[in-house]
Image: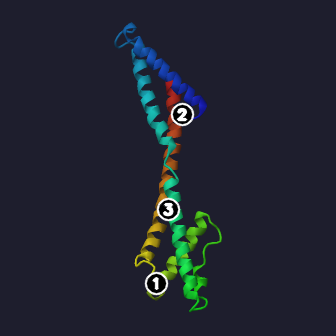
C-alpha cells in the first residue's frame, strides 16, 4: 500500500467512525446507511489485502542457505583430508567460488551427484561424518528449493493483493 492509498484508508476509517458516531441521524435502510455499511466492508477487505501484501520473511531461507553452506564446507574439508591418501579426490568436492545461493546450490548438486556413489560416501563415513550426511545434504537442497517456491507464491499473492487494494480504494472513493 503506497502513501496515497494509506491516507485514503485512514480517511475511510474516519468516515466510518463518523458514521458509527452519528448512526442515529440516518434512517435505517437509507442510502447513507448503505454507504457506511459498504465502507465498513471495504475497510475490512483493505485490512486483509494489506496484510497479504507483506508476504513472508526471507530469514528462514537465510538459515537454510547457511546450513547448506556449513554442510558443503564440512564435506569439502573432509574431501581434502581424504585427498592426502588419494590425490585428486578433493577436486570433485571444491567449495563454491561464490557465496551466493545459486553457487551454493550448484555445488550442492555436484556434491550430491558424487555422493550418490556408495563407495564415495563410504570414504566420508570412514572419516566419521554422520551416517545421514548425504540425506541431510539432500534435505537442505530440497528445503531451499521449497523456500524459493514459497517466496515466488508469496510474491504472486502480493501482486494480486496490490491490485485488490487499488480496486478497493477506488470503490471506497
- Mark 2 Cα-neighbour bin, 10 Å: few <14, some 14–19, many ≥20: some
Place of residue 64 in the rendered image (x, y in percent of width and height, measured from the top left)? 49, 62
Residue named by callout 2: 166
Q: Is residue 124 above or below residue 31?
A: below
Residue named by callout 1: 121
Q: Which mark is residue 64?
A: 3
Place of residue 68 in the rendered image (x, y in percent of width and height, measured from the top left)? 51, 67
CA distance for labels 1 and 3 = 23 Å
CA distance for labels 2 and 1 = 56 Å
- Pointer 2 or 3: first along the chain: 3
Q: Which of 89 and 162 is in front in this view?
A: 89
- Mark 3 Cα-neighbour bin, 10 Å: few <14, some 14–19, many ≥20: some
Disc 1 secondary structure class: helix
**Residue at position x 60%, y 78% in the image:** 94
Q: In this view, does 101 lie to the left or right of 27?
A: right
Disc 3 secondary structure class: helix
- Pointer 2 or 1: first along the chain: 1
Place of residue 23 in the rendered image (x, y in percent of width and height, measured from the top left)? 38, 12
Place of residue 15 in the rendered image (x, y in percent of width and height, measured from the top left)? 48, 18
Residue 173 in view in this figure: no
CA distance for labels 2 and 3 = 35 Å
Q: Is residue 149 above or below residue 74?
A: above
In the current view of this chain or complex, which residue is farthest to the right? Answer: 97
**Residue at position x 39%, y 21% in the image:** 37
Q: Nearer the viewer, mark 2 or mark 3?
A: 3
Amino acid at each position: 500500500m503506497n502513501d496515497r492509498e494509506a491516507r485514503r484508508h485512514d480517511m475511510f476509517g474516519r468516515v466510518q467512525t463518523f458514521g458509527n458516531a452519528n448512526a442515529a441521524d440516518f434512517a435505517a435502510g437509507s442510502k447513507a446507511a448503505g454507504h457506511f455499511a459498504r465502507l465498513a466492508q471495504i475497510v475490512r477487505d483493505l485490512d486483509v489485502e494489506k496484510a497479504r501484501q507483506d508476504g513472508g520473511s526471507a530469514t528462514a531461507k537465510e538459515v537454510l542457505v547457511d546450513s547448506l553452506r556449513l554442510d558443503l564446507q564440512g564435506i569439502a574439508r573432509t574431501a581434502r583430508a581424504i585427498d592426502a591418501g588419494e590425490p585428486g579426490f578433493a577436486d570433485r568436492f571444491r567449495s563454491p567460488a561464490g557465496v551466493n545461493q545459486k553457487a551454493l546450490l550448484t555445488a550442492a548438486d555436484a556434491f550430491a551427484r558424487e555422493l550418490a556413489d556408495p563407495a564415495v560416501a563410504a570414504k566420508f563415513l570412514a572419516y566419521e561424518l554422520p551416517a545421514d550426511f548425504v540425506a541431510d545434504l539432500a534435505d537442505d537442497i530440497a528445503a531451499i528449493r521449497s523456500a524459493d517456491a514459497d517466496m515466488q507464491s508469496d510474491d504472486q499473492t502480493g501482486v494480486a493483493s496490490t491490485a485488490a487494494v487499488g480496486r478497493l480504494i477506488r470503490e471506497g472513493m
